[in-house]
Image: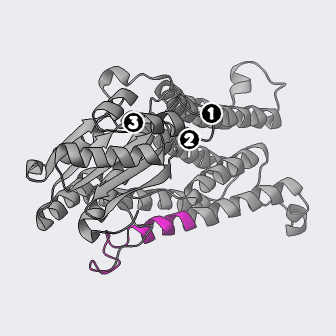
Amino acid sequence: MGPTPAGGLWTPANIVTLVRICLVPVFVVALISPWPQWLGLPQVADDAKELVAAGIFILISCTDWLDGYLARSRGEVTDFGKFMDPLADKILVAAALLALVELGSMPSWVVLVILAREFIVSGVRMTAASEGAVIAASWYGKAKTVFQMVAIVLFTVKDSHMAGSVHAAFSDGLWLLSWGVMVIALVLTVVSMLDYIAKARRLIGLARADGAPDADAAEVSLDALASRVLDAARASGRTVGTAESLTGGLVAATLTDVPGSSEAVRGGIVSYAAAVKRDVLGVDADDIERFGVVSEQTAVAMAEGARRELGCDVAVAVTGIAGPGGAEPGKPVGTVWLGVADDAGCRARLLSFEGGRREVREQTVRAALKALLESLEEGSTRL
């Protein structure tokens, strides 16, 4: 769960991200400098120069999809990539907007709105991080980025400032399209900012601290969630244990990272192989053959076996497909069965996660900790 080792820093995805950042000055030079004269190409008109700049911008934008695909497909989602990828997008968009202002193709107030949003959201995120919470991104932010980039391309290929009469401007189809896309981008910019603020309003003092948490509120960190599980266990005088397949012991490791965890954690069983599930946890061999290791039957039996073998009051079990391979018909990568065994009995539920191997495992750990917390706090709460 910790940062990726230094040896894993130079992954293909991270290299693509760094290349994207290095290409930003190339785009700016192509857009605002008289490079045709520098290269002795007076035949290259301004319109052609703008098309070249737009092409470079589109190429840089496409690398954003490429590095994400490489990271997820290769299971190489790193902390460095999580930091640099969104930063590269912001550098590209900010540089393009400022260049268009320099050319007089875009009013400065548009850039002010977009950059102000980035500063405000960054401040909200830092405040949330200081409280051990992360704010889940919504689709507004992704849509905002797409519309901003499309608008930048349109403004790059067409000098979009209003020249001449109002009638002449509104009779220009490309002018209307450019501003139409930009208006949508600006609306999404403001809406996504308000969404971040709403999710973090308790963290930044805009709501009462004792209010009930919202379903879409900022999620606490795994360490903070593990601490809550252990506090609940100690308060109720109960112990917990784990049986893990795809997470390979990460749930138990997250719990035991918290000082004093030995008071409540009995242990964990890493049952990665089907034989271990069968021989150690008592999963029925016929169920494995009939339903597979990623199934409700296996998750339930794993949880029951962990509770029995570890002698704990509450046991959580997870079995699933973290990827990048291992998908089965009807069970794509990200399919996870989670089981819980406690005094109220045993039950399981099916979960579906997105992302690369590391992201699926992290989401599984979070779900397992939440399931333990629910069982400890509410007793017979059903999954």
SS for tag 3?
Answer: loop
Given the image, on which type of amino acid does mark 2 rest?
Leu
SS for tag 1?
Answer: helix
Label of residue 60 in the image:
1
The answer to whether the residues at label 2 and label 1 have Cβ atoms under 8 Å apart is: yes
Q: Is residue 193 magenta?
A: yes
Residue 171: x and y in percent read: 91, 62
- Which of the two labelled residues, at mark 2 and mark 1, occupies the earlier sequence position? 1
Q: Residues within 10 Å of mark 1 (few under 14, many from 20)?
A: many
Reading the image, the residue beneath label 2 is: 92
Q: How many marks?
A: 3
Label of residue 246 in the image:
3
Look at 46% across and 48% down and name the residue there: 296
Look at 76% across and 61% down and name the residue there: 180
Mark 2–mark 3 Cα distance, whole angstroms, equals: 37 Å
Q: Residues within 10 Å of mark 3 (few under 14, many from 20)?
A: many
